[in-house]
Amino acid sequence: MLSIGIAGLPNVGKSTLFKALTKKQVEISNYPFTTIEPNVGVVAVPDERVGPLSKVAGSAKFAPTVIEFIDVAGLVKGAAAGEGLGNKFLAHIREVDAIAEVVRVFEDQNVTHVHNKIDPDNDIEIVNTELMLADLETINKHIEKTKKDPRAKAEMAVLEKVKSGLESGFMVKDLGLDEEEDEIIKDLNLLTSKKIIFVFNVSEQQLKENWQPSLEIISATNRGDYVVMAATVELLLSESTPEEQKIYLDEIGLKENRLDSLIKTAYKTLDLMTFFTANENEARAWTAKRGTPIGHAVSTVHTDFEKRFIRAEVINWSEFKMYGSWAGARQAGKLRTVGREYIVQEGDVVEVKI
C-alpha cells in the first residue's frame, strides 16, 4: 500500500489536514506535540472509473485503490539532536513512500507559530536541515559498522559520497545516485531520499485570492511538487454533504477540493498509475509504478500471482466500456493476450491466468 507521511513544524495544520483526509477524529489543539503517537488513516483514491467498471463487468461490489496517510508529531529546530520529540518523530516516517510537508502560510493570532513569525521558506529550510541531520547520523553509524568489513569497499564509497553530500547541504534525492548506489543505501530508509510534496496551508481568503508561492519559497523547496490548500476549508468540505460541498466550492471559486489534488499530485510525484481487475465478485483498482511489467504489477493483487503467472488478458478501460463485458470484448477480438514482460498501462483492465 502506498503510504505518505504528513510532516512539518508544530501548529502548521497537519492534524487538520489529516482529519479532512480521513474524516477521522483526531485532537486538534493550539500547542505543539498534540499528535504524540502517529495517527494512521487509509484514504480512497478518487477514481470515477471504478463504479462504472463494476456495472460493465457485472461485479457484485467495487473497491478503489487506497493511500495510507500517517500524521506525526511536529518537528522543531534541533529535533535531530533530541529537541521536542526528536528522532521518535523521524522514525515514524522512515518507512513511507513520500513526505507531504505542510508549510504554514496563513496568519492567525489565535494559533501561535513556533517561531512567532510566518516565514514559509525559513520553515522549509528548518525541516530540510533536520531531515538531513537525522540522515547524517544514520550514515555515520552505518559507516562505523561497515568500515570494519574489508570486503565492503563499494558500500563504503557510496556511504562516504552520501555523507559528503549531506554535509554540503544536499538532500540524498538530489545527489544523482545511480541505480546501483541507490540499491546499496535502500535499506537505510534515508529521509531525504524520499520524494517531498509541499502543502502550502493558506487561509480561506488567500485561497480565494489564488495565493501562489514566491520564487524564494519555490527555491527553498528545490522545485519540488506542491499543492496550495486551506486545511480548514478542506475539513469543512469533508464534513459536508455533496450538495453543500458544491455550494461552498462555488462560493470560493474552486472546481474541486484540494485533497483530490494532493492525491493526484502524489501519484504524479511518485510516477504511479492505476490498473483494474474485474470479475463477478468485485471490480477493483490497483496501483503500480509506471513502466512495471505486468508479471510484477499483479503481485499487488495477490502475492502468489507473480510466481504463478502464466499470461494475462488485457483491455483498456475505455474499450472495455465500449464492448460492455468480457464476452463482448472477446467476441470483438479486442482482448490482448500478453506475457509477464508486458508493461501495464494506465486504465488497463486485467484478467490474470495462473
Image (cartoon, rainbow, N blue to C red):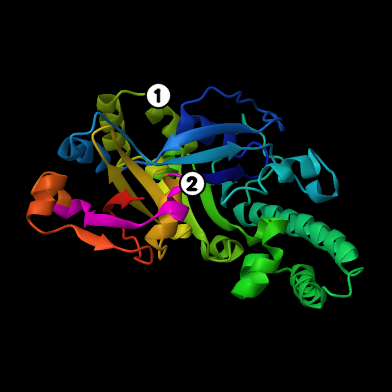
Q: Toward which corner of the image does residue 66 lie, by quadrant? A: top left
Q: Quick check: marks 2 and 1 in contact, CB under 8 Å? A: no
Depicted 263 relative to depicted 218: above or below: above
Picture residue at 25% right of the left edge, 26% below the top: 243
Pointer 1 residue: 239
Q: Position of residue 118 (x, y in %)?
A: 62, 46
Asked if residue 232 can be seen in this view, the reply is no
Left or right of 1? Residue 282 is: left
Left or right of 99? Residue 343 is: left
Q: CA distance from mark 2 to mark 1?
A: 37 Å
Q: Position of residue 304 (x, y in %)?
A: 47, 47
Depicted 232 relative to depicted 303: above or below: above
Depicted 190 relative to depicted 6: above or below: below
- Region of the chain picked out in magenta, as a range: 302-319
Badge 2, how many Cα within 10 Å: few under 14, some, many 20+? few
Pointer 2 residue: 303
Element on which disc 1 rests? loop
Amino acid carrying label 2: it is Thr
Label drawn at residue 160: none
Q: Position of residue 308 (x, y in %)?
A: 43, 52
